[in-house]
Structures are given as C-alpha cells and as structure tokens.
Image: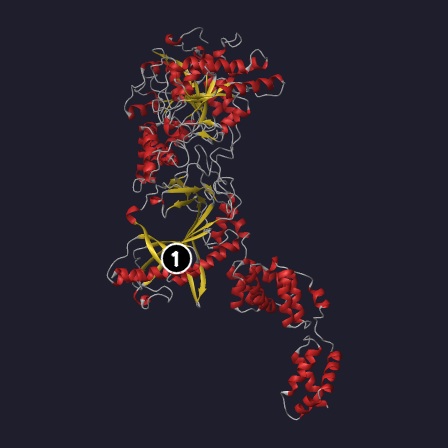
C-alpha cells in the first residue's frame, strides 16, 4: 500500500474526491488499495461473488487520465464502488446469488449503474446476497453466506449483506444494494454503516434483477450520510426504460444536509418501540431520540396501528410478484439448463428450477403461486393490496403531523450465522422495515451505537419524495453523535500487517 | 357410430340438412390482430419482423432478460382505441395491464402482458348485411397484449419433438384481441363477420388483415342448443383456421359434428380442437381438465392507464370513413348500385382509387365500369395495382374520357388499356401516331360512304330491292376504309340516309 492511501479507509467520498482532485491520491492507488483490502477480508467475509480487478484498474486509470488532462470530471470520478450482484453491468457476470444464473453474463447495464459509470465511478466487484434478494442474512445465497466484519461468525444481514459488509470493512467507500422489505436498511444496521432506500420510483429499476417489482428499490451503502446523498443524487430521476420511475424533479439533498433538526417535528411510532426490541437496541435508539431533542427537534409519539399487519401483507405481495418475476428462469434462453442432455420440455423446466433455485426461493414461488391461484386471489392478493393501502394511508396521516419518523431499523443486532433456522424468525428481522416498502417511502439506517460489540441502526423514515428530508435528519444525528468513526478490526486470524 | 359422425358430414354441401331445425348454432369469434406500429409493444425493436433472420429483431426487453422492464407503446394504445371506437365500444377512463402467467418456450418472461379485468374498451358491436338480413354481433371487448415468439419443431408437436428451435423476432409485437359475443348463428355469418372485421381493420390501417401469415388470427367458439333456448350449450374452441374458407368450413364441420353427437344423445366435450385443412376436420387438442390457471394479477412494472376524454376525442376525430358508410355514400352521391358500391369499397385502396378516378373527371358510372371490369382483371392477372401500373389513375381518367367523348371506340380503348397498364407510355401520342382516333368528321365519313356506294352497285341494288342484309356489307366497306375507327351504328344510319335519298 502506498503512503498516500494509508488511513483513507474511513474517509468520506467528498474527502477522497478532494484528494483525487488535488492529485494527492490517484484513483489507481485508491482502487488498488480497495482491491487489496477486499482480498484481505474476503477469507473472513465472502462478501463478493465476482471481482473485476482489471476492469476496475482500467476505469481508475481512465479517471486519473481525465483528471490529469484537467477534463471536467464528476466529484464521483475515480471512487471505487461495489455492486450487489442483482445489478447488471455490460459483459460482466450477474448471478443474483443463484446457482441457476451461474456463468450468465449480462449484455447490458442497469440504468442506475450506467449513471454512476458515466460519472466515472470504478466498479470493483459484485457482492454476495440472498438468492434473488430473498432473505435477511445472506445465508440464502447459492454461493454460501457472507460474514459480518464486526464478527465474521455473525450474519451481516440481508439480502444486501455483501454490499453492507464490504463498506463496513472499509474496503470500499460505498456500494449499491437493493431494498424490497429492508434489504438495504437491515444489513446497514447490522454492519454499522449508512444504508439508504429512496422513495419507490426515484431510482430506475431497469437492469435490476427483479424480486418484487412494486417494492424493489436501489440505494447506496456508505459510511457517511453525505456520501449516500451524493450517490442518490447521481442515480435518481426519471428513466424512459422504467415506467415506474417518477417524473417529479429530483430535489438535491446536498445543500440542505446540514440544515439541522431544530424545530423539526420527529415522530416515534409507538408500535416500533414494542417489546420485541433487544435491550441494547432500545437503549441506543432512546439515546438517539434524546440526542435529537438536544438538537432542538420536537419529539412526538405517534401511532401506526397497522404496523403488525405489514409482514403478513408483505409475504403475500412479494411472493406473488416473485412467483411471476422468476418464471423467466426456465432454462430456455440463459442460465444453467438441466438436465444437461436432451430432455423433454417439462423435465427441463422441472430439473432446471428444482436444482437451480434454493429452498427459500422455492418457498416464495410456491407461496406466490398459491395466493394468485384461481379462488384464492380475493382472499389473499386483493386483501393484501387493501391492507397495503391502509398502511400507506396511516403513514400519510402521521406525516401530516410530523416531518419524519425515527425508529429502530432492526429489533436486534447481528445474529450468529445459522441461528435463525426457521423462516418465520428470519422474516421477523424485517418487521420494522417492511411497512416502508409497502408505502413506497424513503428510509435510511444509520449507526447509533452498539450492543455487545455489534452495531445498532437507527431508522429515519420520511414522506414520499421527502428523500432530502430523510437525509437531512439522518445527517443531523450523524454529526451530533460520534459513531461514524467506529470501524471493525480485521480478525486476528487474518492480520498480516497494518490494517487500513 | 361416433366415427361415422365425426368423419361423416360433407363440408362442401353446406352441412347436413335439418340441423337448423333441430339445433341452433351459437358462435363467437376471438380475433387477434397484430398492430401496424413502428415498434414492438414494450420495447424499441421493430414490429415488422417479416423476412428478418431468426432472433435478429430482439433486445433485453422482448427476450425477457434478467432485469429488463417493459415500456408501453402509446401508438398501440391509440390504435386499439381507434379500433374499439370503430366497433362502437365504450372507452373506460381507467385501464391497466395484467400478467397472464404460463410456461411455454415461446414466452420468454413466463408471462404474457395482457389485459384482464380493465381492458381498453368494452361493449361494442359490429353489424352488417347478409343475404338481405341485418346481423348485429356484439363485441365484448377490444384489448391489447403482446405476441409470442415462434417455434419450429423437429417433429409435429412440441412435447414429442426431438428438438425445437425458437425465433423471438415476433415476441412483443403489439397484438390486439377482439372478443366477440356469441351472437353469430351460422358459418356464413361467422365468415361475413370476419370479412367485415378485416375490412374495418385494414380501413383503419391498424392491421394488414392477412390470415395466411397470421398477422390476423381467428379462433371460434361453437356450441349448439335447441332453437329458442337461452342456455348456452357445451362450448368447443376451434383454432388453426388460416383463411376465410377455413373458418367457414371448420365451423360448418364443427356444427355437423356436434349435431351428430347430440343426435346420438351424447354431449360434446368442452375442449379445444384444431382445424386440419388437409383432412377437412377438427381434431381434439386439449380438454378442460388441463385448463391452465393463468394467475392474472396487475402488471407491477406498468402504471395504470388514465385514458383522458381529450385523447378519445382526438382519436375519434381521426376516424376515417368506414366501409359501410362509404358504400352508402357512393350509392347516394354517384348513383352506383349497392353491389357496385360494395365491391368498390371492399378495400380502402380500391375505394380510394374509385374516388380518385371520379375526382380526376371520369363520370362515376364509367369509373365503376372500368374499375370493376377491365382494370380489376388486369390488376388480378398481373398482381399490380392501377396506381402502380404504367397507366396510373390519371391515365385511366384520360382513356375513359376519350371513349366517353367518342374519340376512340371501346375495342381500341381495351387494347390501349392493357398496353399502357403493362408498359406505360403517353396515351395521346399512341392515339396520334397510330391514327387510332375515330373518324368523327361528318364530311369525311360521308365522302367514304359515297365512295363505298359508288363502288358496290350490286349491294346497293340488293338493298334497295329489299335485301336488308346487303346493307351490312356496305357498312363493312366503310369500316374497312376507316380502319375500324368509326362507330358502326353511326355508319349504318348514315348509309340508310344516303340510300333512301337516292
């Protein structure tokens, strides 16, 4: 590692960009250090499904050349970033964590990724995740789980566990994840990093391998709220390739990040502070609430009575959509076709999907197929859509009284890999994040303390399209608290020299 | 014996006698029509995939690659609304797309984007004259969906084929489905309904009306019941009819087949049957036990559609004159017979040609006579439309008018018509250089007549002696002198006058 790069692991994107701009640091050095750090951590974490060393270094050198030639470059140019392996990048493998897509290479690039590429960002690799983003621990990955940098025996959360872990390990300053029911915020919470899910429709889903189309949203993992704002700003906005993107102008969140919370009304939903919270989480969140109060925020207890219906509603709608979204993985056009010898059509379908999909994916396909079946649609799918509207309406009512909501992200901190063996206890991980997806709202998780040495996350939720407000409220806490400088130590078994 | 019944009825002779008395046929047609848009329904690939090498007209969206999303083609929505309005449908203010889920190799996403409970249009009708009766057939709905790819089997059907090749070029082409009410009562009515429907679609320019290539496809639901019964019988769906004739024959066959079963006290199965042209019969394809559960649900990748009344008004204002209205106008405006008007308006192109010829200055009756007669014959024979022929619309107007003015006679005109149609050329030059114009100068004609009289004293004497036939040889003589460029009747008249004056 060159002297210039040493110690930059905790730097914000803004600070890294300044160093690049002043030529104190090259993107090639920065990217090389990121790749080295990934290699160092990988035996403990398994955060990546594929790495793109040469591709990354080429991009980094191109960025350096542009800066040396005094071309006008984006602030983000030359900054390394990792991509959750559900996002397509032209001519690069994309597996969605599934064995079924092993060896598949996408011929095109996702819109959100293309926007970051246009800004000159450097893609270092594709990160591990639960298969087709279905899970809360990365244990459903077809390629083995990812470890948590704070304790590699623990889960980093999921489904975007690899993206959260690599940012927490300070290998890369940022990564992209996707959030369908909490898959950005929950791993951010468990890994002690910032994870932002924008308003549904703010970031194009084109090129994101769909889990549940009406819930999926792409968002950044960073170590600073400001960095999340920078990435969000670059990716957000209408996309002619995604009809569900919103045409409303994108409000730049950066100028108002430091506006503080004095005079803002922040609601604490009673239902989110229930008995299911672990003591350490409750204590950390209560301390955060107190800190907000110190900053001049007006704290109000509010109620979202249908919160407890969120999970069951989610587990009707998301499987219904996924049962249809995953029908295309039939072995006909791409992915692993089984059996490998010539077989009748039905056998090909059955074998490909039986062996290609893992148990959780099959469970959800079956659930979704069932709830959409003739005679059950009204009882399940239609009813779930009605409850979804109810949940969204309750949020709207609350947001007529408060500017944002603050709550825990996850009821507990990171759990040991293998600890949650039954599906329901795993589903409970998302109880506090799922309602936000059902209502299409922006939400963020930021570090707010520790319980037994493992990070606790604070969730900030805003009204639809109030992404800038969510980032501002989160930023105020980050500034007032000291958590952003807390970093995990490289496990002793891997310590070979100086940690970043 | 059932086998006799299924193989029995002769299709060509109009079906078994007595069926109409014992049973009433109830027929509804479902018609799929590919829309003539530039691009596919949900991506930028071309909608016109004909002649393209397999799998060259595809992209991540229509191939259903991981991560790809559909984007709606507005033009396809407008074409569907235009068609629905022409079929007297109402256009709801809200519509949406749904997913129809099923596995098949020609369906890359594992679902077809279609419309389930909120189609673009509802409750229309198509009415037409048939054998002096007015038939009014309800239209349940006209909705929009996407076409599938095409399969080529090394073997007869997918499930037993040694292998199959798939071409996705057609995948995602906008496909309009026109669902008809079971209001048709005979194979003739069904065929006529389809003829009229195709006529409307091609008039609107939304579809090319080709059943052979499958850009327009027709399935028929056929059941029988006792006349006057309001209950519907067991419905059989017939597929694989690739021409109007096939539709007519397949329905006739199916009516006779079901009647045969009912006669023997058997009930037809609810099933899908395919028309086998070479065997002139329908064969069972699948029965209801295998009916798929399509698990329709709203397409989450496409927001619901709001169809503004302003858009509906705009589309209404672009509605062209429809064939039936146009035919009625030709009758009242130009005094054509309804038969002539019907044939001239069979296609929008032929109606447009007629109107162009009349607008060019040829009297309507003459225009109709030419177009339905000699021009139609040449067009069919040489597979060339008048407008694209050497003659052109303007040429026909000039040629027709030369005949009207008596400048050339009919025989000359027909010869010129064919020559110009095939090879082109300047009409006036040809008439001039070949001296084809009629000898219409009265003095010239009289001089020739007197020359013939002087040269044929015997014929003159015979005629004057009462032999009427002798006049014909004198007429022939004059026609010979004019090289056929005189009106024989006028010459006869002239000779009579000259000879009686003598």
Q: How many marks?
A: 1
Instruction: Classify 10 Å Cα crowding around label 1: few (below 14), some (14-19), many (20 and above).
Output: some
Residue B226, percent from left and from top: 29, 63
Looking at the rendering, in which quadrant would you find the N terminus of chain B? Answer: bottom left
Q: Quadrant of residue A415?
A: top left
Looking at the rendering, in which quadrant would you find the C terminus of chain B? Answer: bottom right
Q: Which sits in the foreground, B437 or A441? A: B437
Residue A300 visible in the shown view: no
Q: Quadrant of residue B16?
A: bottom left
What residue is disc 1 on? B277
Residue A318, percent from left and from top: 36, 32
Q: Is residue A342 above or below residue A51?
A: below
Question: Extreme bottom residue here?
Answer: B465
Question: Extreme top residue here?
Answer: A497
Q: Is residue A384 above or below residue B161?
A: above
- In terms of secondary structure, where does tag 1 sit? helix
Q: Which sits in the foreground, B367 or B136? A: B367
Q: Which sits in the foreground, B144 or A326? A: A326
Residue B9 visible in the shown view: yes
Residue A28, percent from left and from top: 54, 15
Q: Is residue A361 above or below residue B273?
A: above
Q: Which chain letter goes with mark 1?
A: B
Q: How is the image coloured?
A: secondary structure
Q: Which sits in the foreground, A139 or B91? A: A139
Q: Is residue B60 above or below residue A301?
A: below
Residue A245, percent from left and from top: 48, 33
Q: Please indicate whether residue A279 sits to the left or right of residue A57 in the image.
A: left
Which residue shows up at 41% across the image and 57% down it?
B138
């Amino acid at each position: 590692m060159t002297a210039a790069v040493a110690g930059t692991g905790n730097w914000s994107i803004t600070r890294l960009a300044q160093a690049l701009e002043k030529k104190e640091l090259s993107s090639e050095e920065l990217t090389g250090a990121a790749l080295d750090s990934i290699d160092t951590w990988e035996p403990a974490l398994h955060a990546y499904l594929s790495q793109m060393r040469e591709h990354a270094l080429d991009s980094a050198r191109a960025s350096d050349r542009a800066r040396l030639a005094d071309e006008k470059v984006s602030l983000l140019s030359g900054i390394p970033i990792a991509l959750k392996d559900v996002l397509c990048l032209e001519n690069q493998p994309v597996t969605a964590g599934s064995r079924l897509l092993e060896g598949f290479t996408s011929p095109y690039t996702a819109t959100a990724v293309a926007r970051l590429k246009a800004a000159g960002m450097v893609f270092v690799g594709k990160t591990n995740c639960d298969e087709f983003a279905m899970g809360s621990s990365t244990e459903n990955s077809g390629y083995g789980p990812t470890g948590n940098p704070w304790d590699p025996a623990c889960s980093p959360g999921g489904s975007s566990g690899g993206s959260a872990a690599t940012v927490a390990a300070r290998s890369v300053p940022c990564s992209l994840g996707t959030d369908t029911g909490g898959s950005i915020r929950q791993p951010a919470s468990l890994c002690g990093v910032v994870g932002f899910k924008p308003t549904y429709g703010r970031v194009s889903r084109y090129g994101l391998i769909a889990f549940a189309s009406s819930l999926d949203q792409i968002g950044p993992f960073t170590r600073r709220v400001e960095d999340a704002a920078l990435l969000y700003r670059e990716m957000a906005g209408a996309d002619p390739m995604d009809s569900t993107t919103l045409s409303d102008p994108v409000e730049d969140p950066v100028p108002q990040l430091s506006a503080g919370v004095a005079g803002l009304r922040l609601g604490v939903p009673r239902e989110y502070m229930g008995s299911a919270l672990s003591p350490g989480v409750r204590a950390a969140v209560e301390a955060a609430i107190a800190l907000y109060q110190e900053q001049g925020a007006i704290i109000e207890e509010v109620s979202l009575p249908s919160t407890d219906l969120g999970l069951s509603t989610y587990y009707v709608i998301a499987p219904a959509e996924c049962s249809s979204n995953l029908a295309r993985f039939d072995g006909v056009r791409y992915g692993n076709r089984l059996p490998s010898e010539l077989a009748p059509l039905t056998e090909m379908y059955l074998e490909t999907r039986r062996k290609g999909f893992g148990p959780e994916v099959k469970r959800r396909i079956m659930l979704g197929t069932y709830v959409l079946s003739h005679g059950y649609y009204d009882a399940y799918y239609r009813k779930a859509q009605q409850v979804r509207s109810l949940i969204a309406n309750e949020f709207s009512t609350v947001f007529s009284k408060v500017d944002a909501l603050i709550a825990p992200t996850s009821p507990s901190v990171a759990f040991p890999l293998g600890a949650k063996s039954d599906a329901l206890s795993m589903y409970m991980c998302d109880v506090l994040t799922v309602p936000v997806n059902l209502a299409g709202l922006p939400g963020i998780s930021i570090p707010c303390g520790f319980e037994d040495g493992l990070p606790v996350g604070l969730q900030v939720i805003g009204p639809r399209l109030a992404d800038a407000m969510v980032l501002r409220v989160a930023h105020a806490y980050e500034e007032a608290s000291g958590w952003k400088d807390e970093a995990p130590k490289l496990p002793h078994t891997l310590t070979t020299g100086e940690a970043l | 014996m059932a086998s006799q019944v299924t193989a029995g009825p002769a299709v060509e002779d109009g079906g078994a006698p007595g069926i109409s008395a014992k049973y009433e046929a109830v027929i509804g047609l479902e018609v799929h029509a590919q829309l003539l848009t530039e691009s596919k329904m949900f991506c930028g690939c071309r909608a016109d995939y004909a002649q393209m090498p397999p799998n060259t007209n595809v992209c991540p969206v229509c191939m259903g690659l991981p991560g790809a999303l559909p984007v709606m083609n507005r033009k396809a929505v407008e074409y569907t609304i235009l068609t629905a309005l022409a079929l007297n449908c109402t256009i709801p203010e809200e519509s949406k797309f749904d997913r129809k889920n099923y596995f098949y190799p020609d369906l890359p996403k594992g679902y077809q984007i279609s419309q389930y409970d909120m189609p673009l249009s509802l409750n229309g009708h198509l009415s037409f004259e048939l054998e002096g009766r007015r038939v009014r057939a309800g239209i349940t709905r006209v909705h929009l969906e996407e076409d599938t790819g095409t399969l080529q089997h090394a073997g007869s059907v997918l499930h037993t084929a040694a292998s199959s090749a798939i071409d996705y070029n057609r995948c995602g082409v906008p496909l309009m489905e026109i669902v008809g009410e079971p209001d048709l009562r005979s194979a003739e009515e069904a065929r006529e309904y389809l003829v009229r429907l195709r006529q409307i679609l091609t008039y609107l320019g939304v579809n090319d009306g080709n059943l052979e290539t499958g850009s327009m496809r027709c399935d028929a639901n056929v059941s029988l019941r006792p006349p006057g019964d309001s209950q519907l019988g067991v419905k059989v769906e017939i597929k694989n009819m690739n021409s109007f004739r096939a539709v007519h024959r397949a329905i006739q066959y199916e009516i006779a087949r079901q009647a045969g079963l009912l006669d023997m006290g058997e009930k037809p199965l609810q099933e899908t049957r395919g028309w086998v042209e070479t065997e002139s019969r329908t064969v069972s394809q699948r029965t209801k036990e295998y009916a798929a559960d399509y698990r329709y649900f709203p397409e989450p990748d496409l927001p619901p559609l709001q169809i503004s009344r302003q858009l509906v008004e705009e589309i209404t204002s672009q509605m062209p004159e429809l064939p039936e209205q146009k035919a009625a106008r030709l009758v009242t405006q130009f005094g054509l017979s309804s038969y002539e008007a019907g044939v001239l308006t069979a296609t929008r192109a032929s109606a447009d040609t007629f109107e162009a010829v009349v607008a060019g200055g040829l009297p309507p009756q003459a225009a109709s006579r030419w177009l339905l007669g000699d021009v139609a014959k040449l067009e069919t024979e040489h597979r060339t439309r008048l407008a694209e022929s050497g003659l052109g619309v303007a040429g026909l107007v000039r040629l027709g008018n030369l005949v009207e003015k008596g400048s050339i006679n009919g025989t000359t005109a027909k010869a010129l018509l064919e020559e110009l149609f095939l090879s082109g050329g300047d009409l006036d030059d040809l008439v001039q250089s070949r001296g084809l114009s009629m000898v219409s100068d009265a003095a010239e004609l009289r001089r020739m007549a007197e020359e013939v009289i002087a040269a044929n004293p015997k014929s003159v004497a015979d005629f004057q002696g009462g032999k009427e036939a002798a006049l014909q040889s004198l007429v022939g003589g004059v026609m010979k002198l004019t090289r056929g460029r005189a009106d024989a009747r006028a010459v006869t008249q002239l000779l009579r006058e000259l000879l009686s004056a003598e």
